[in-house]
Each structure stands twice: as structure tokens, then as C-alpha cells.
Image: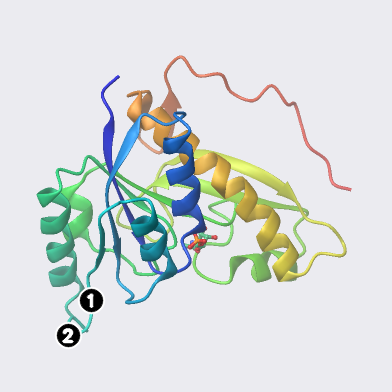
Amino acid sequence: MKKTRLAVLVSGRGSNLQAIIDTIESGDLSAELAVVISDQAGAYALERAEKHGIAAMHVSAKGYKGRRDEYDALLAEKLRGENVELVCLAGFMRIITPTLIRAFPNRILNIHPSLLPAFPGLHVQKAALEHGVKFSGCTVHFVDEGMDTGPIIIQAVVPILDRDTEDTLSTRILKQEHVIYSRAIQLFAEGRLVVQGRRVVVSDGKTSTTEFLMNP
Ligand code: GAR
């Protein structure tokens, strides 16, 4: 099977990037990492890429204040230059503009640490705890022109425990992020994701047979 050429866009520690690299190296993901791009100099994610011999770039956003679409045009140019087929945002802490989205229609994925559409934005594990929901989790979705609003590909549910802090909850959610991101990318690589309006149907897919979850 032909390998999908991926770019991963990061801003920080890059644990999701690491999970993607590990899954590719274990042979369970038919993808090759063309490039890792960070908007932050010194992001640990760049070091992770370099350790694995993957091209790593810092594309500084300095000088692009109020000109986000120009920064995104620069990103699009770099991604095209690497013949990227799928762009994965993994802790990329910038809102991307239509300039980038239209350059890669239905070819940009994002991972978010909540069960969207609940808790979009930032500090979402804290928000879930404060709201008192009994389940949270994570979501991989296609990126559209809204914030955290695009069609949902896959979600994993994580129960919230009475003793949870923002830290403990974030850690358990992150563990599932590392599983579902690679799974979503593999489904994309296999050409099995069919976007029908807001719904993403997985062709030949098995959906969950769990009838319900209850907590407590
Ligand atoms: C992850 O939890 C990811 O879901 C979140 O940032 C973290 C990055 O961690 N992304 C967002 O909140 C996007 N709105 P990582 O750098 O270790 O992959």
C-alpha cells in the first residue's frame, strides 16, 4: 500500500507526534513523515523528530502579527514543497486561517482533549472538571473554518473520577489521544473516511458495539 505523506504541526512537547512516529516505526501506520513544523523555536517536538531522522522546521510567526493568513500561506507553501498529502495538527497552538484550510481541503486533522463539541478551546480538562461532567475524552476531527468544529472522525471516552485533578485527567486523556490519532490517520491512509456533511462515515468500518457507559 502506498504510504501517505504526512506533516505534523506542533508547538510544544510533541507526545502525540511521538506516538505517530512510534506507530509508523512499528509498521502499523501506512504513512511516512515528510516534515514536522513548529511555530515555536526550541519546541521539544522538533528534537523528537530529529532523533528519528525526520525533517524538522521552525517556521517563526514573528512579524506576522495581524497577518495570520500570510503566515498560513507560508506554511502552505512549505507543505506543498514537501508533497504533503495530510496535515496533522498535534498541539499546534494557533488558529489556522482559511488560507491553509483551502490549500488542503479535508486534508487537515486536529486532535483535541475533550469530547467535542463539548469544551472547545483551551484549558478544557479544567473546564470539564469544573462543569462536573462524568465523562470526557478526546476527539480527532477534520479541520474546518470554525474553532474545533470540523467533522468528527473518532473519539475515545474517558470517565472522570471523583479524585481527578486537571493533571490526572489530562494524563489519562493523553494516553487515549496517542491511540486514536494514529487510528484516524490509518483510516485516512486507507481512503476509508467518507465525509457526508457533518458526519464522517468509515467505509467497511466496525463501530462500537458498547451499548452504553455509565459513571458512577
Ligand atoms: C494535547 O493534549 C492535544 O490534544 C492538545 O494539546 C496537547 C498537545 O500535547 N491540543 C489542543 O488543546 C488543541 N486545541 P503534545 O504536544 O504532547 O502532543
Residue that carries the numbered disc 2 in the rendered image? 63
- Residue sticking out furthest to the top: 204
Element under disc 1: loop
Across and down, in percent, residue 71 comes to: 17, 70
Report the amino acid beneath label 2: Gly
Q: Work out whether 89 lies above or below 210.
A: below
**Which residue is disc 1 drawn over?**
60
Residue at 54% across / 40% down in the picture? 180
Residue 207, label in figure: none
Residue 60 in the figure: left or right of residue 123: left
Q: Eyeballing the image, is 179 above or below 168? A: above
Along the viewing direction, whichever of 193 and 151 lies nearer the viewer: 193
Q: In this rendering, would 66 be left or right of 173?
A: left
On the image, the x and y values in percent for residue 25 come to 43, 37
Question: Which quarter of the figure has residue 148?
Answer: bottom left
**Image quadrant for the N terminus?**
top left
Q: Residue at x 53, y 53 (%)?
A: 117
| Residue drawn at 10 percent across, 51 percent down | 81
Nearest to viewer (mark 2 / mark 1) = 1
Q: Position of residue 6 (x, y in %)?
A: 29, 43
Q: Position of residue 170 (x, y in %)?
A: 66, 62
Label 2 with label 1: CB-CB less than 8 Å: yes
Question: Callout 1: few (<14), some (14-19), or many (20+) C-alpha neighbours within 10 Å?
Answer: few
Q: Secondary structure at mark 2?
A: loop
Residue 21 horizontal side relative to residue 55, left or right: right
The reply, left or right, for residue 203 in relation to residue 171 is left
| Position of 28 relative to 62 (above/below) | above
Separation (CA) of disc 2 from disc 1: 8 Å
Q: Is residue 91 above or below residue 16?
A: below
The answer to whether one can see residue 165 in this image is: yes
The amino acid pointed to by label 1 is Ser
